[in-house]
Amino acid sequence: MKKVLKTVLYVILALIVAALSFAAYIYFKGIPSYDPPQIKEFTIRPTQEKIDEGARISALICSSCHMGKDGRLSGGLMKDLDPIFGTAYIANITNHPVYGIGKWSSSELAYFLRTGLRANGRYAPPWMPKFIHLSDNDLESVICFLKSDSPLVQASEIAHPASQPSFFAKFLGNTAFKPLKYPSSEIIAPDTSDAVNYGKYIAHGKVECFTCHSADFAKMNIEFPEKSLGYMGGGNTLINLEKKKIFSANITMDAETGIGTWSYEDFYKALKEGKRPDGKALRYPMLPLGNLKDFEIKGLWAYLQTVPKIKNPVNRTWE
Ligand code: HEC
Ligand code: HEC
């Protein structure tokens, strides 16, 4: 009997030691780096038109995070990161050669924006979104803008301390978070006259509405967005700038719990001005997307009509 007890005790001890060593391994390893990737060639041919379009796309999908206190894309503390992931600093992406991305080539930028891997193999966790469905043309415009002489990206000397990922973030970094695959062929956006498919392109590639508007970031499918749990049915937990929880809205056409009773004009106003039909202002992080173009909003509206309705009453308490 004593012998059995002793063996059990040794097994338990061995398990504890194994668990502790694994924890220590994760703790000290942090969010892992990878072998430097084979960067694919991505050529840009800047024109003023592309720079302007890149600036518009950046205002839609980059500046909400990267806008710094000097009015340039110099980054700062990420105030809306869920504290369970620790603290993170948003990078300075102005053209400063040391503190910014002044030395990055267009190909390195394209590779990073698609996969999350830097040229040296350092990986950016999911709080820097990845743009695997963005068309090559739109990506080119964004990079033309980043490399332009726009005041928004002029070299800023703002430097940030290293991010402090929590143990949980490090754990996920070693298990769940993985760099995305670089697309194997050119990505071409649908024709803008094809409203439904163009709207889908915006919802998946250009503004990535599906990420926030599905049920759970952890059950999101970046590669096949429609396979995300509760696709467009809302309820995903987001954090506002005061670190309070806010839930994304159900934007399927369910009449009771989604936006099925809204008119196109209601939708237009919600996106452009951040106002609901009942007059309430939409709250952070649903920022007004003022520079969406009319054909983009029309496309989104047309596409949302085709998305399967989900009955999901989201807790939307207004103070
Ligand atoms: C939700 C917030 C968020 C959005 C939106 C966002 N970023 Fe980032 N970005 C981050 C964070 C956080 C980091 C730092 C990641 C890390 O620590 O590895 C980062 C890092 C980067 C880097 C790496 C810079 C370096 O020096 O390592 C580049 C380049 C970049 N972002 C460009 C963009 C562009 C271009 C867009 C829009 C197309 C964009 N980001 C949208 C949060 C964001
Ligand atoms: C960063 C996360 C995020 C992204 C990206 C995002 N949304 Fe939202 N959205 C939210 C949140 C959170 C709310 C709820 C805001 C509130 O309750 O005040 C919301 C609310 C809405 C509403 C209001 C619905 C209602 O019933 O009040 C509409 C419409 C909407 N979003 C459409 C979109 C579309 C279309 C896109 C893409 C072009 C998009 N959103 C991208 C987070 C996001």
Image (cartoon, rainbow, N blue to C red):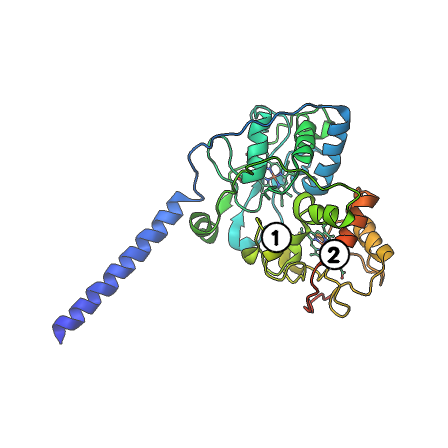
At 87% from the left edge and 55% from the top edge, which residue is drawn? 265
How far from the left and from the top, in percent, is residue 169? 48, 50
Three-letter code for the amino acid on which mark 1 is drawn: Pro
Answer above or below: position of 250 versus 39: below
Q: Cβ(mark 1) to ligand 2 < 8 Å?
A: no
Q: Which mark is residue 304?
A: 2
- Residue depicted at 81% across the width and 54% down the height: 270
Q: Residue at x 59, y 60 (%)?
A: 229
- Which residue is under mark 1? 225
**Viewer-proximal residue, 75 or 275?**
275
> Disc 2 residue type?
Leu
Q: Quadrant of residue 54?
A: top right
Q: Is mark 2 within 8 Å of ligand 2?
A: yes
- Near mark 2 (Cα within 10 A), the count class, few <14, some 14-19 or many ≥20, is many
Q: Quadrant of residue 244?
A: bottom right
Left or right: 142 as drawn, with respect to 34: right
Q: Ligand 2 is found in which quarter of the picture?
A: bottom right
Provide residue 231's location: percent of width, then percent of height. Answer: 64, 59
> Looking at this view, is 192 or 279 the one in front?
192
Determine if residue 319 is in view.
no
Q: Mark 1 and mark 2: span between their CA atoms?
A: 14 Å
